[in-house]
């Protein structure tokens, strides 16, 4: 089996290639719970910090357009979760919320992030809810993209993701096969978002093959684990939030029901929810301008930036 440390070389040939540092931010590495973790930094020290956490099959640079949009006023730190991007794979297969929260706790401590804004998409949103509820003294504001209580456990979106994870190919015979794979899963994906995904999820193998940079077998095994002890009830964490919170739902998403978003706002007055018409689960890809606008507007709130 290929190890995560093999995924750090730049792709060459007819496949993806790394963009310039000015467009993608600065690469940084840090050790978290014994694993070498990669993160990307935009903006200057001294500015308000936003930590960004990606979803299940995603990567730090999925947030590059948003980071570029905010880098003039904030310092952005986007993290490759364990097993993804240029972070180490976990030989123990601990791809669960408890491990991601522990990694974030060490990340904040080691970088000296006393107060910061936290943003998370999907899986990263689960981590964000739990961390923010556990550390109300550190998170000044929370932004969550298209996930809420129950989203990962049941419902149309959860079942779709389980089917997709159960059918992940081990590799691709050529680069165009990988392009077709992602296009089939997300028919409405823009060319820019598709290129970003190909750039950051694949690495070249031998004989023209393309391999995952991710620990897909380990990630899939964890995601398909039905042990109730591994599932997280997010309601206590949503109820426990003490910071201004923005939940952004894709209007066409099958993952976060509108009723759940409404229930969250009813149960906790610090939570507000907005819906982006026509966007699916990947709101930041499907409607980037509206996504950026909602976040920029939220960040002007005096409670968010006192």
Image (tube, helix red, strand yellow):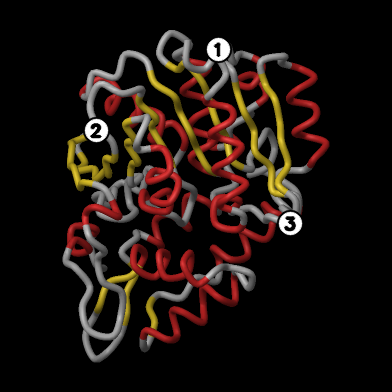
Give residue 88's mark: none
Please indicate whether residue 257 sits to the left or right of residue 146 in the image.
right
Viewer-nearest of discs 2 and 1? 1
Give residue 278's mark: 3
Relative to 31, is 141 above or below?
above
User: What number of labels is visible?
Assistant: 3
Q: Position of residue 9 (x, y in %)?
A: 16, 66
Relative to 233, is 138 above or below?
above
Q: If the image is split into quadrants, where does the N terminus sit?
A: bottom left
* Mark 3: few/some/many CA within 10 Å (<14, 14-19, 20+): few
Judging from the image, what secondary structure is the residue with disc 3 in? loop
* Mark 2: few/some/many CA within 10 Å (<14, 14-19, 20+): some
Distance from disc 3 to disc 2, alpha carbons, whole Å, reads 39 Å
* Residue at image mark 2: 33
Residue 34, by quadrant, is: top left
Q: Position of residue 245 (x, y in %)?
A: 60, 23
* Residue at image mark 1: 303
Please indicate whether residue 39 sits to the left or right of residue 127 in the image.
left
| Dot placed on the residue nearer the N-terminal end, 3 or 2 | 2
Contact, CB < 8 Å: mark 3 with mark 2?
Answer: no
Contact, CB < 8 Å: mark 1 with mark 3?
Answer: no
């Amino acid at each position: 089996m290929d190890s995560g440390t093999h995924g750090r070389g730049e792709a060459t040939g007819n496949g993806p290639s790394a963009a310039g540092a000015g467009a993608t931010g600065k690469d940084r590495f840090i050790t978290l719970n014994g694993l070498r973790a990669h993160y990307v930094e935009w903006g200057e020290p001294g500015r308000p910090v936003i930590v960004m956490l990606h979803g299940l099959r995603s990567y730090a640079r999925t947030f590059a357009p948003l980071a570029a949009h905010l880098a003039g006023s904030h310092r952005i730190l986007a993290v490759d979760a364990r097993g993804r991007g240029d972070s180490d794979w976990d030989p123990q297969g601990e791809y669960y919320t408890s491990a991601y929260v522990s990694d974030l706790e060490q990340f904040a401590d080691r970088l000296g992030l006393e107060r910061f804004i936290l943003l998370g998409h999907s899986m990263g949103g689960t981590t964000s809810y739990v961390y923010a509820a556990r550390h109300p003294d550190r998170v000044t504001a929370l932004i969550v993209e298209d996930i809420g209580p129950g989203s990962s456990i049941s419902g149309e979106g959860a079942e779709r993701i389980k089917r997709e994870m159960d059918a992940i190919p081990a590799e691709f015979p050529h680069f165009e096969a990988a392009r077709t794979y992602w296009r089939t899963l997300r028919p409405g994906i823009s060319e820019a978002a598709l290129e970003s995904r190909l750039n950051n999820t694949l690495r070249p193998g031998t004989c023209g093959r393309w391999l995952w940079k991710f620990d897909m077998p380990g990630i899939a095994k964890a995601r398909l684990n039905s042990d109730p002890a591994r599932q997280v009830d997010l309601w206590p964490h949503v109820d426990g939030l003490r910071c201004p919170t923005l939940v952004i739902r894709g209007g066409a998403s099958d993952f976060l029901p509108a009723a759940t978003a409404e229930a969250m706002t009813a149960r906790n007055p610090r939570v507000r929810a907005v819906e982006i018409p026509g966007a699916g689960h990947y709101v930041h890809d499907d409607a980037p301008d509206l996504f950026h606008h909602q976040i920029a507007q939220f960040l002007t709130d005096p409670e968010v930036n006192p």
